[in-house]
Image (tube, rainbow, N blue to C red):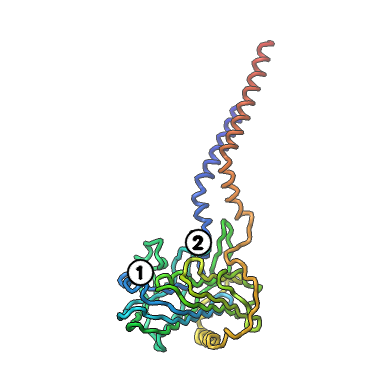
Amino acid sequence: MKTIVHKFLVTALFLIAVATSQKVFANAAQPGVWNAGGTVYTMLYPEDSLTFKKVQMVEEKIYIQLYKGYAVVKGNYLFKNTTNEKLNFKMGYPVNGIYYGGEIDLNEVTLDSLSNFKIKANDSWLPLLKENHPELNNDYKSPVPSSDNWTVWQMTFAPEETQTVEVYFIVNTNNAQVRQGYNTEQRNAFIYLLESGSVWKNPIEKGSFYVQLMDGLTTENINGISQGFGFRYNETHKLYAGAKTNFSPTPKDNLVVTYYEHNEHFMFDKALLQTENLFSKIDEMSQSALETLTYTDVQTGNPYEVESTFWGAFPGLLTLFVVFAPFIIGFIAVVIIIWAIFKWRRIRRKNKRM
């Protein structure tokens, strides 16, 4: 009888331990893409908040060339001051940071790198300044990502002025981790967070997005591309083309591409030595008449989907076990009580015969 009671207590303690560990499992299971090469393009300073919604991003054309381990990006933007007043404010890209949003609620995206960034407005190159802003980490709901390391530049708009802005940069995509439930995989991942465009006067009238596969990559190396862009594919140029019109960006508008495989020996610094050549290639791409090419429908997959494994499913099984633990414990208790009563009656009858 003592042995049975001992086993019962051990079982109960185990169930309690599992139940209290679920907070850890719940945090670990938050979906998202970690350490991805990505971009967030936004107004930055709180003191510039009076200019929010006064400048409209009329059009954006985003050119992305994916390589094994990194991505090269060029963005062409058309901005318009929709007021009759002169506007001065700062724009910025985070060098790295955390952004909340994406495919579903509580999706967390961690940006890993931003290298060799340069920008020009109305054909004039602008000076850059990296600045620290730890105060931006405080507001979970902010359209600005949590980061204390920013690339910043000053913008000035005359009343009702329209300006063209071009940016270039390279990001490391090799260190990404994609999480779905309790399953994780290491992949290459690129992110363009359109959600940050909510600080501009909406809507964005037109957005064109081109993703070209370089370095021998093929469609078979693409794990998934975000839906909502209507991406189609041109085999000759290894090029995906998508678009959005008259949209006000939300987390569902973010562009996420997961592809290829993690290379533990990849050296990003070596790739950066080719910056001038890489920027020349993406310039050539952006100056081509890509809208005139012939594209065909193609399956793009889900960039957040990962393969299920036993260890990925194990915490979920433990969760189910905890849910049904009261019933299991109750059943065990009833069995023990019935067994004890039956055993006690047998002993009592035996004693009477004696």
Examine the rendered structure and indicate whether residue 152 appears above or below residue 2.
below
State the image quarter where residue 166 is shown: bottom left
Examine the rendered structure and indicate whether residue 240 appears above or below residue 138.
below
Q: In the image, what residue type sits under mark 2?
A: Asn
Q: Could you say whether the residue bearing mark 2 is in a helix, strand or loop?
A: loop
Q: Residue 346: image x %, image y %?
A: 67, 19
Residue at 51 percent across and 75 percent down: it is 245
Q: Which mark is residue 133?
A: 1
Q: Residue 55: image x %, image y %?
A: 38, 77
Residue at 61 percent across and 62 percent down: it is 306
Q: Which mark is residue 209?
A: none
Q: Could you say whether the residue bearing mark 1 is in a helix, strand or loop?
A: loop
Q: Residue 309: image x %, image y %?
A: 63, 57
Residue at 58 percent across and 73 percent down: it is 230
Work out how far the residue at label 2 is from the one at label 1, CA to CA, in angstroms: 23 Å
State the image quarter where residue 45 is shown: bottom left
Q: Is residue 149 left or right of residue 256?
A: left
Q: Residue 341: image x %, image y %?
A: 62, 22
- Kindly tell me whether residue 174 is visible in this rendering: no
Comes first in the chain, label 2 or label 1: 2
Depth-wise, is mark 2 or mark 1 nearer the camera? 2
Q: Is residue 309 left or right of residue 35?
A: right
Q: In the image, what residue type sits under mark 1?
A: His
| Mark 1 nearby-residue class (10 Å; few <14, some 14–19, many ≥20) | some
- Kindly tell me whether residue 152 is visible in this rendering: yes
Quadrant the N terminus occupies = top right
| Residue receiving disc 2 | 107
| Mark 2 nearby-residue class (10 Å; few <14, some 14–19, many ≥20) | some
- Mark 2–mark 1 contact, CB under 8 Å? no
Examine the rendered structure and indicate whether residue 317 appears above or below residue 186.
above
* Of 107 and 159, the residue lying toward us: 159
Quadrant the C terminus occupies = top right
